[in-house]
Amino acid sequence: MKAVIHRIFSVGMALLVLFSTVSFTVEKHYCGDVLVDVSVFAEVEKCASEAEEMLAKMDCCKDTVDVIQGQDELSFKTFNDLDFEQQVFLTSFTYSYLNLFEGLPEQIVPFKNYSPPNLVADIRVLNQVFTI
């Protein structure tokens, strides 16, 4: 269970870094005030050919490009970049957290490989000793 949660968290963090650094553009084509096509990865589709000739004379078609900029630089901090108080807190927190979950000591069962003797007769019935 712990390994599954660790893998899910690792994949989630990797996807977060990936999506925060990716840049892409969104292209939009308008004919007049009407949005004709929107494209993220390919060229936008222009107006129809016969309508394009008529609209080219009127000059009412326009293309807009929206650029969504990703993060350019990722900052990596080391332990030495932290203040002294932060280093002390991080060290003490890590130490106390790791010692919080100590494993149980291994229990030794001395009679684990012992098999009881075979009963030939029931001794309680032979001695007629019964619990009331």
Image: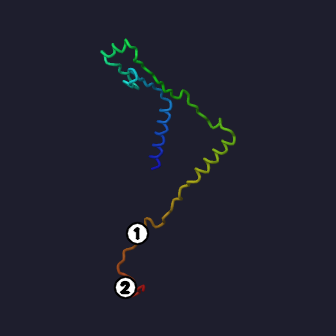
Looking at the picture, does residue 90 appear above or below residue 21?
below
Looking at the picture, does residue 7 appear above or below residue 103?
above
Q: Quadrant of the C terminus?
A: bottom left
Q: Residue at x 39, y 83 (%)?
A: 123
Left or right of 19 in this view: 53: left
Residue 63 percent across, percent down from the top left: 42, 19
Looking at the picture, does residue 125 appear above or below residue 37?
below
Q: Residue at x 50, y 26 (%)?
A: 69
Q: Residue at x 61, y 51 (%)?
A: 96
Dot 1 amino acid type = Ser
Q: First in sequence: mark 2 or mark 1? A: 1
Dot 2 amino acid type = Val
Which SS class for mark 1? Answer: loop
Who is closer to the viewer here, 7 or 74?
74
**Badge 1: few (under 14), some or many (20 or more) residues near its Cα, within 10 Å?**
few
Looking at the picture, does residue 25 appear above or below residue 91?
above
Residues at discs 2 and 1 in contact (Cβ within 8 Å): no
Residue at the far right in the pictured view = 84
**Res. 115 mark:** 1
Residue at the far bottom in the pictured view = 128
Who is closer to the viewer here, 63 or 11?
63
Which SS class for mark 2? Answer: helix
Left or right of 13 in this view: 86: right
Residue at the far top in the pictured view = 57
Left or right of 58 in this view: 90: right
Residue 58 percent across, percent down from the top left: 38, 13
**Badge 2: few (under 14), some or many (20 or more) residues near its Cα, within 10 Å?**
few
Q: Residue at x 35, y 21 (%)?
A: 45
Residue designated by label 2: 125
Kindly report the distance in space between the C-alpha atoms of the residues bearing marks 2 and 1.
23 Å
Left or right of 99 in this view: 107: left
Who is closer to the viewer here, 86 or 56?
56
